[in-house]
């Protein structure tokens, strides 16, 4: 099973599996139905202060990554929740794959 990263505005595909939104804000102009998100993990997204500081300026990307990793290290419960969701999806995929191969 592979992990795929997609923009939320890209349409859902049958191959997507569980769709996890990692963002503190709901995407503008997108209904929950159209987003087809299974899980919304707000707490693991970059903080509002970090987002404001970054301001989508490419020159700040390297420092943004460092600061975001620092935030993640201070928020182990959110990181664990994301890992747990990934494990659940992986385990479900493995069970279905094994069952389908019988």
Image: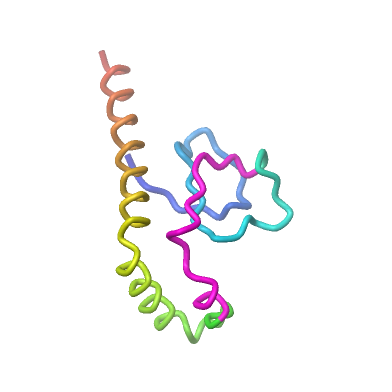
Residue 101: horizontal and vertical position, in percent?
A: 27, 18
Farthest residue toward the top? 102
Residue 9: horizontal and vertical position, in percent?
A: 63, 52
Residue at 29% x, 17% y is 99
Q: Horizontal placement of 14 versus 35: left or right? A: left
Residue at 65% x, 43% y is 32
Against 83, is 16 above or below?
above
- 15 and 47: which one is in front? 47
Against 95, is 1 above or below?
below
Quadrant of the rendered image containing residue 100: top left
How many numbered marks appear?
0
- 65 and 1: which one is in front? 65
Against 14, is 86 above or below?
below
Residue 6: horizontal and vertical position, in percent?
A: 51, 52
Q: Horizontal placement of 29 versus 6: left or right? A: right
Q: Quadrant of the C terminus?
A: top left
Farthest residue toward the right? 29
Residue at 65% x, 56% y is 27
Residue at 40% x, 81% y is 62
Q: Does the segment drawn in magenta span residue 55? A: no
Against 17, is 24 above or below?
below
Q: Which colour scheme is used?
A: rainbow
Residue 1: horizontal and vertical position, in percent?
A: 32, 39
Q: Horizontal placement of 37 versus 85: left or right? A: right
- 48 and 29: which one is in front? 48
Per the rendered image, the range of residues in magenta is 35-52
């Amino acid at each position: 099973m592979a992990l795929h990263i997609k923009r939320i505005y890209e349409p859902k595909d049958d191959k997507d599996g569980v769709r996890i939104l990692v963002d503190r804000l709901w995407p503008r102009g997108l209904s929950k139905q159209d987003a087809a998100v299974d899980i919304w993990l707000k707490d693991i997204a970059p903080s509002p202060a970090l987002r404001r500081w970054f301001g989508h300026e490419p020159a700040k990307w390297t420092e943004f990554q460092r600061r975001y990793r620092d935030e993640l290290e201070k928020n182990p419960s959110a990181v664990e929740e994301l890992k747990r969701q990934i494990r659940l999806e992986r385990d479900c995929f493995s069970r279905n794959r094994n069952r389908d191969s019988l």
